[in-house]
Image (cartoon, rainbow, N blue to C red):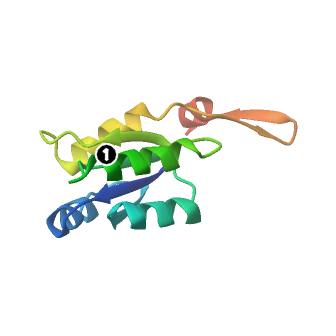
Amino acid sequence: MKHSILIIVDSNESFRLAKSVDSPHRIDVVTGVENAIEQLYQLPYDAVLYEGFSSTMEERKLLKIISLEQTPPVCQKKQTALTWAESVDQLIRSIPPSVQIMDGTFENDIFRICLN
C-alpha cells in the first residue's frame, strides 16, 4: 500500500537531500514548521518525519498540531546517524496496518498486500 509522507526540514541542504529520496510512496518535503502546519491542513498524511529544529518551541508546536488531528499520522524525529532514505524506510515500517470499512465489508491492508 502506498503511503503519504510529509518530511519537514530546517535547511536548504536538508531540503535537497530529502527531495532526492526515491520511494514508491508519495513524499512531500517542506521547510519549517509554519509550512508544515499549512501542508497538514491541506492534505492527510500517514506519517510525518522531521529533523530537529533550532527551537524546542517549534517542535512542541508541530507535535501539538499533529495530536489534534482525528487520526494523527505516525510522527518521528529523524535520527542524525541515518540518511533520509533510511529514516523514511524506518518510518514506513512503523506505520501500523489499517482496517477500513467499505460497503459493509472490511479491507485489511495486510491482506491486500499479500494478494498483490
Q: Nearer the viewer, residue 71 or 88?
A: 71
Instruction: Label 1, secondary structure: give it.
Output: helix
Can residue 2 be seen from the camera position used here? no
Which residue in the rendered view is the most extreme toward the left? 81
Residue 44 lies in what quarter of the image? Answer: bottom right
Q: How crowded is mark 1: few (under 14 residues within 10 Å), some or many (20 or more)?
A: many
- Quarter of the image with the C terminus is top right
16 displayed left or right of 70: left
Rendering coords of residue 54 (x, y %): 20, 54
> Is residue 113 placed above or below 63 in the rendered structure?
above
Looking at the picture, how far across and down is residue 2, in whole percent?
50, 49
Q: Is residue 76 visible?
A: yes
Residue drawn at x 41%, y 41% is 75
Q: Which of 94 and 111 is in front in this view?
A: 94
Left or right of 19, for residue 112:
right
Please give the name of the residue rendered at 58% of the width and 45% of the height, measured from the top-left corner: 68
**Where does the image place residue 112, in percent across and percent down from the top left?**
61, 36
